Image: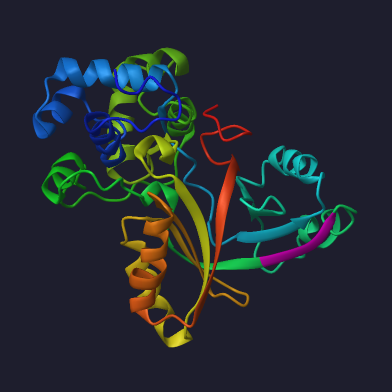
C-alpha cells in the first residue's frame, strides 16, 4: 500500500478515508464506502492498516476542559537546555501542547490555568530556571476554532455533509454525565472506535445500556472524536503559529473568518501585543507565503509574526516526541 514509508504522504484514497473519520470518528465502513464510492471491505482493510501502524488514531478527548482557562506560553531557552525544559513541561498534566520553533531557541506551549490566578508555572517555576531567558504568557479570551474542529480539505461539501452526524430534531442536551457515562467515556478516550460490545465488557455495563448511552452522548455533543494524524502524512509539511494584531472592532469578524479557512487548525483571541493567535498547516513555504500575503493580508490585519514549528513535542493523542502514544 502507498502509506508504507513513515514520512511519505498518504495516497489520495487514504487521505479521504482519514478525512471521513474526521466527520464521524465512529463511522462505519459501510457508510464510508457508500459515500466515498469504495467497497466496505476496502474501507475496512485500509482503516485497519492506517490504525494498525499508528498512522492515525481516533480519540475522544475530554470535553470538560474550559479552553478559556488557558495560557499561551512563549519560552525562550539557552542553547543546549531545550530538551530538559521540554521534557519537564511534557511531564505536566496541565500542559497539553508543546511545540519547539524551527530556530530551536523557543518553546510554544499551552498551559491550563484558572483565569485571574497567579499561575505558579509562569510566575515561579519557569523564571526560577536559569536556562529560561524569558517567558511571555497570553490568556485565551475566546476560542474560534480548535484542533478537533479542523477538517482535511479533500472531501467535497456534499461528502462531508453526508458523513457528519446530524443532531436529531428536538434532541435535548444531556444532563451532567453520571458514573455510567464516565465509565464509557474513559474507555473511548484513547480509542473512540472501540466497539460497543467491547466497551460493555470493559465497563461491566449491559451491552444495550452502553449502545444507548453512546448514542445519547453523541447526540448531545458530549462524545466528541478527534483524528490524530501527522499532518505531513497528509502532504502538509509546514506547521506554523501566527500571532496577529487586529483592530478590536474587527477581531471577532477576522477570527470567525480564519476559523473557516481550510489551513487553520486553531484560532484564539488572546491578551497581549497580538490579540489573535492562529495555528496552520500548509503544504510548503510558498503556500505559507500565500496565506500571509493573500488570505491574511486581505483581512486588513495590522501585523503578524510567524513562527514555524520545527518539532511538535506534545499534543493530545500523542506522547512526547510527537508520536502517537
Counting from the top left corner in percent of width and height, residue 316 is at 53, 40
Task: Give whichever of 243, 282 is nearer the camera.
Answer: 282
- Residue farthest to the front, as pictured: 286
- Residue at 52% of width from left, 59% of height from top? 241
Task: Examine the structure image and report whether residue 263 is included in the region drawn in magenta.
Answer: no
Counting from the top left corner in percent of width and height, residue 101 is at 63, 52
- Residue at 43% of width from left, 18% of height from top? 53
Q: In this view, does 26 lie above or below 69?
A: above
- Residue at 63% of width from left, 61% of height from top? 71
Q: In this view, does 179 lie above or below 67?
A: above
* Magenta part of the chain: 132-137
Horizontal side of residue 60 vs 68, given as left or right:
left
Quarter residue 152 falls in: top left
Horizontal side of residue 37 vs 119, given as left or right:
left
Is the N terminus in the top left, top right, bottom left or bottom right quadrant?
top left
Tell me which secondary structure the magenta stretch mostly adopts: strand
Task: Give whichever of 20, 230 is nearer the camera.
Answer: 230
Task: Give whichever of 253, 132 is nearer the camera.
Answer: 132
Is the C terminus in the top left, top right, bottom left or bottom right quadrant?
top right
Amino acid at each position: 500500500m502507498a502509506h508504507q514509508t513513515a514520512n511519505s504522504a498518504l495516497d489520495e484514497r487514504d487521505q479521504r478515508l482519514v478525512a471521513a473519520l474526521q466527520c464521524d470518528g465512529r463511522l462505519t465502513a459501510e457508510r464510508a464506502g457508500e459515500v466515498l464510492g469504495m467497497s466496505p471491505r476496502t474501507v475496512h482493510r485500509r482503516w485497519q492498516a492506517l490504525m494498525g501502524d499508528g498512522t492515525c488514531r481516533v480519540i475522544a478527548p475530554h470535553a470538560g476542559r474550559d479552553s478559556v482557562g488557558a495560557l499561551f506560553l512563549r519560552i525562550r531557552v539557552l542553547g543546549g537546555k531545550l530538551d530538559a525544559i521540554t521534557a519537564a513541561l511534557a511531564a505536566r498534566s496541565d500542559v497539553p501542547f508543546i511545540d519547539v520553533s524551527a530556530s530551536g531557541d523557543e518553546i510554544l506551549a499551552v498551559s491550563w490555568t484558572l483565569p485571574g490566578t497567579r499561575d505558579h508555572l509562569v510566575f515561579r517555576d519557569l523564571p526560577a530556571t536559569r536556562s529560561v531567558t524569558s517567558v511571555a504568557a497570553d490568556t485565551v479570551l475566546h476560542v474560534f476554532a480548535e484542533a478537533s474542529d479542523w477538517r482535511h480539505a479533500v472531501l467535497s461539501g456534499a461528502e462531508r455533509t453526508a458523513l457528519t452526524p446530524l443532531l436529531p430534531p428536538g434532541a435535548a442536551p444531556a444532563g451532567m454525565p453520571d458514573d455510567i457515562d464516565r465509565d464509557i467515556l474513559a474507555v473511548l478516550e484513547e480509542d473512540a472506535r472501540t466497539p460497543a460490545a467491547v466497551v460493555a465488557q470493559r465497563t461491566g455495563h449491559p451491552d444495550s445500556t452502553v449502545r444507548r448511552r453512546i448514542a445519547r452522548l453523541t447526540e448531545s455533543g458530549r462524545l466528541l472524536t478527534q483524528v490524530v494524524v501527522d499532518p505531513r502524512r497528509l502532504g502538509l509539511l509546514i506547521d506554523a503559529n501566527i500571532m496577529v494584531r487586529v483592530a478590536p472592532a474587527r477581531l471577532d469578524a477576522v477570527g470567525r473568518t480564519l476559523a473557516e479557512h481550510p489551513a487553520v487548525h486553531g484560532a484564539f483571541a488572546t491578551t497581549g501585543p497580538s490579540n489573535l493567535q492562529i495555528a496552520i498547516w500548509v503544504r510548503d513555504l510558498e503556500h505559507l507565503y500565500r496565506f500571509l500575503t493573500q488570505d491574511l493580508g486581505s483581512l486588513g490585519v495590522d501585523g503578524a509574526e510567524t513562527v514555524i514549528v520545527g518539532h511538535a513535542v506534545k499534543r493530545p493523542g500523542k506522547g512526547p516526541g510527537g508520536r502517537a502514544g
